[in-house]
Amino acid sequence: MRILSLLLLSLLPLLLFAQERKKVDSTLTVSFEDYDPPSSLIVPEHIMTSASIPFVDVHSHHWRMGTQDLDKLISEMDELNMRVVVNLSGRGGEALKGMMDNINKKGYQDRIVCFTNINIRSIDDPDYLEATLAQLRYDKSIGARGLKIYKSQGMSNTDNAGNRIKINDPRLAPIFELAGEFNWPVLIHYADPKQFWQPHDTNNERWLELKLKPNRKQENERVSWETIAEETYDLFKKHPNTNFIAAHMAWYGNDLVYLGKFLDDNPNVNVEIGAVIAELGRQPRAANRFFEKYQDRVLFGKDSYNPDEYATYFRVLESDDEYFPYYKRYHAFWKMYGLDLPEPILEKLYWKNAVRLIAGLEADMWE
Ligand SMILES: [Zn+2]
């Protein structure tokens, strides 16, 4: 009790400060967007163009894999030390078949994994479930190794009556059960950064992003962040025999204590770090504590495939560099610090957790 009141006392000035803080509009003579001076700090720098350990990227998108030049992709992967890429945009059916044919023809089955996708929008079709389950069986037979659910599928897809289709709609349940039977992980991107639902003002940490990408604003949309999250948590609970990978650290990269409790509460859920590396880079000590405790539950993912951007991920995870920038200021206007993760934790993040979750990846590929 005494500790609690001490804690509250120490928080008091912070609370008062938060209340007194004024919204400032355009009284500055230098704009926030213009003010980005080069740092004068001289400290050691480690620019890392490849990972120290061969890794699996579990969150990548290659929509034209049926026709693209896979030799080029593999040589870029080799330069990054990326052992395996997981293409989440397999699309299913004949599109996936075209991709698998291209991969097999080149003999890259060990380097490229495809997850498939489903159409949720046609949920009212009389043969919807039967046709979707048949598609998944076919996709598995030609080599799909997981299912990816897009954010639109639980946020904006509507049924024939115009109602938003919830991702935990009972009519979809057999799909997630079948994924569990297949031992397929379901990688699910739900919601988006919470700031997209908050007022676009000077208290919003994603102010610049919402200015540059106004279509990301959710403030006036009818579904709240919390509703989407609750529906997805319900999905996790209803399918305890299906492994899920919540994309983007479930948007709790800025609250790792909460994320830890969430993982404790959902043993069938794992997370990946795509597009939220700047959250980890701004809290290297807290992030280290999180990785120490949850090292079996976090996978490496990047999302948008741009080879030049991986260097920032390696630097945050592996170096002990200080005060360096993220590559998109609209994601992070702050500077970052390397986590200097110990090798056993890096191994789990880079590949061991992926090998545990994705059938067909074998530990001996790392020997
Ligand atoms: Zn993605």
Image (cartoon, rainbow, N blue to C red):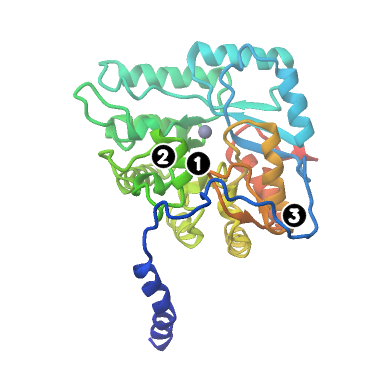
What's the amino acid at mark 1? Ala
Residue drawn at the location 27% of the way across and 16% of the way down: 125
Q: Is residue 59 left or right of residue 232?
A: right
Compared with 70, 206 (above or below) is below
Q: Is residue 104 left or right of residue 148?
A: right
How many residues crowd mark 2 within 10 Å: few (<14), some (14–19), many (20+)?
Answer: many
Q: Nearer the viewer, residue 144 or 346?
A: 346
Question: Residue 349 location in percent, x, y?
Answer: 65, 48
Q: Which of the two marks, 3 or 1, is nearer to us in this view?
A: 3
Q: Nearer the viewer, residue 41 or 361?
A: 41
Question: Distance between the Cα atoms at labels 3 and 2?
Answer: 31 Å
Query: Which residue is label 1 attached to?
Result: 247
Question: Distance between the Cα atoms at labels 3 and 1?
Answer: 24 Å
How many residues crowd mark 1 within 10 Å: few (<14), some (14–19), many (20+)?
Answer: many
Q: Earlier in the sequence, mark 3 or mark 2?
A: 2
Q: Quadrant of residue 107?
A: top right
Secondary structure at badge 2 equals loop
Query: Which residue is label 2 attached to?
Result: 190
How many residues crowd mark 3 within 10 Å: few (<14), some (14–19), many (20+)?
Answer: some
Q: Nearer the viewer, residue 138 or 282?
A: 282
Compared with 34, 159 (above or below) is above
Query: Which residue is label 3 attached to?
Result: 319
Q: Earlier in the sequence, mark 3 or mark 1?
A: 1
What's the amino acid at mark 3? Ser
Q: Badges 1 and 2: C-beta atoms under 8 Å apart?
A: yes
Secondary structure at badge 1 equals helix
Question: Distance between the Cα atoms at labels 1 and 2?
Answer: 8 Å
